[in-house]
Image (tube, rainbow, N blue to C red):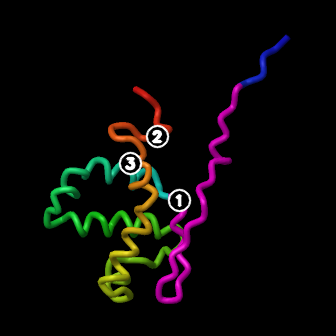
Amino acid sequence: MSKQPTILDLDKVVPAERIVILSGKKIDVSRIPSRVTLDIAKDQDKLKNGGDDSFSAVLKQIICICKPSFPEITEEWIADNTDFEQLMQLIEFVLAPLKERAGAEPGKNEGSPSL
């Protein structure tokens, strides 16, 4: 009798749809690439301390998240098409899943593997 293989089909892991509408563009920010998550983790101290480069670093992460559904997005496009309040809400909304995940349990991400 042969054993059935155990399969983890990560293609079935689909995040809830999250859409930003800005200047008539519908931007899907549902999927946050691992590269963005890793970059934010790597730059966490710089981002927390609010260094000169921190705002630019956050904006670059936002662009990376938006690019798959809106390839034309750039820092200049965001600056030209948002006011300050819209920009702050854009950052808050796009990064909300990462903040929720990080705040799930102090010191440990919910569902993350234990090493």
Image side of residue 27 versus residue 104, left or right: right
Q: Residue at x 60, y 64 (%)?
A: 17
Residue labelled with disc 2: 110
Asked if labels 3 and 2 touch by Cβ distance under 8 angstroms, the answer is: no
CA distance separating discs 1 and 3: 16 Å
Residue stretch rendered in magenta on the structure: 6-31
Q: Residue placed farthest to the front in the image?
A: 105
Tell whether position 26 is magenta. Answer: yes
Q: Find residue 57 and report its horizontal and vertical position in percent.
A: 27, 64
For label 1, count other residues whose C-alpha is less than 10 Å away and answer few (under 14), some (14-19) or many (20+).
Answer: some
Measured from the top left, where is residue 102 in percent x and y?
A: 38, 48
Residue 64 falls in image quadrant? bottom left
SS class, disc 3: helix
Mark closest to the chain's N terminus, 1 or 3: 1
Relative side of 75 to 67, left or right: left
Q: Residues within 10 Å of mark 2 (few under 14, many from 20)?
A: few
The residue that mark 1 highlights is 31
